[in-house]
Image (cartoon, rainbow, N blue to C red):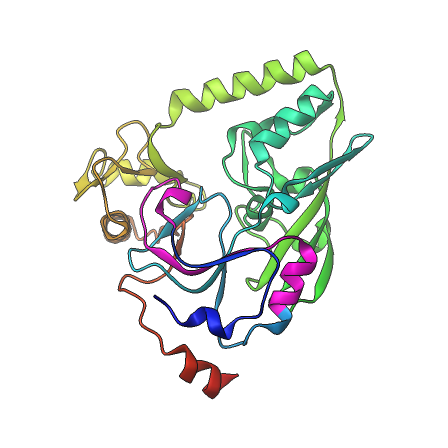
Amino acid sequence: MTDLLKYLPSVRGRMEAQIPLSSMTYFHVGGNAEVFFEPADSDDLIHFLRKRPKSIPVTMLGAGSNVLIRDGGIPGVVIHLGNWFKRIFKEGTTFEVGAGVLVAGFAEKAAHQGVSGFEFLSTIPGTMGGSILMNAGCFGKEIKDILIEAEALDFQGRVHWMQAQELELSYRKSTIPKDWIIVRAWVRGNVLAPNLILKCAEELRTLRAAHQPEGYTAGSAFKNPEGKKAWEVIESAGFRGMRKGGACVSEKHTNFLMNVDQASAADIESLGEEIRAKVRQNTGINLEWEIVRLGTASPIVTDWGKMVQDKG
C-alpha cells in the first residue's frame, strides 16, 4: 500500500490508493493509479491543487478513450472529473458543458433539443475536456468549429479563461499547456428539427461503424502524416493483422491497434513502435502517436517522504 495519501491535503471528494485503471480505459489494459482523486466540485479541485506538495505529479484521466496506461500504473495522483463536472446548461443555441461530459451523449441531448452542429460528436468517444485538448474531429468537422470559450485550472489552482481563437486549434493539437485542466466549455450550434439532426447523427455512426473495428481499441493509433493517411503507410509496411502477444493491428482499419487476447500495455506499445520503425525505414515518415501513453512500465516504487522533503 502506498504511503502517498498521508502527504496529500484533505478533500471532500473521493480519494483512494491503488485503484485499478484498466477497466476505465478502452484498451482494458494498464496498472493502478497510485492515488485516485475524484473531486467533489471545482472548489474541491482548486483546494487540492493549491495545497498538494508540488513534487507529487498529477495526471488527468477522462473517459480513457484515447490513452494507453502502461502496466506499472501511474505514479502520483490521477484526477478524474466526476458528476459535478458532467452538468450541461443551455441558453438558446449555446451550451455550457462540463469537461467530464461524454461528447456523444451531449450530441444526442442537443439533438433532442433541436440544436444542430454537434452531430459529428456522436461518433467520437471521450469527454469534452479531452476533446478540446486534442481538437477532436471527424467527417470534416472539429471542436474548433463549435467552441466559443473554455475555463481551465492550472496545477497551481489558478483559474484561466480562454477564448477559442486563443487556443490555436489545429489538426489534433491545441496550445493549452499540459499542466492545465479544462473544467467547462461553451459551445454554439444552430436551430434545426430534432428528427433531421438525429437522422444525420445516425448516418454518421453507421458510416463510422462500417470502416472502424469494434472491441478493445483506443481509436486511431497515429496521426495522419502531412499529405497522407496513416492507415495507408501502415498497410504498405505489411502490418495488417500483425500480432504481438495479445495485441494486433486491426484487419478492418490498420491505424487501429486492438487488445484481442488479454494483451498487456507493453504488447500494444511495442507493436506500435514496431510499426513506427518499419514505416520510418520504408518511407522516412515519422508516425506520431495520437494515443496518449501514460504511466510507467515497471511497478511504482517511490519514497514520497524524501521527495516531499527534498522538493517541497
Task: Locate residue 302: give its quadrant.
Answer: bottom left
Q: Which residue is drawn at 49% across and 77% down?
A: 55
Which residue appears farthest toward the bottom when viewing the image?
A: 310
Q: Where is residue 245 in the image (x, y as percent from the top left)?
A: 16, 44
In the rendered view, does 119 fall on the left or right side of 124?
A: right
Can residue 176 be seen? Answer: no
Q: Which of 262 and 222 is in front in this view?
A: 262
Up/down of 14 relative to 53, above or below? above
Up/down of 198 relative to 35, above or below? above
Task: Locate residue 260: give its quadrant.
Answer: top left
Q: Give the range drawn in magenta.
A: 21-49
Up/down of 5 relative to 219, above or below? below
Q: Position of residue 56 (x, y in %)?
A: 48, 73
Q: Where is residue 223 in the image (x, y as percent from the top left)?
A: 43, 45
Q: Which residue is drawn at 69% across and 40% down?
A: 97
Can residue 6 be seen? Answer: yes
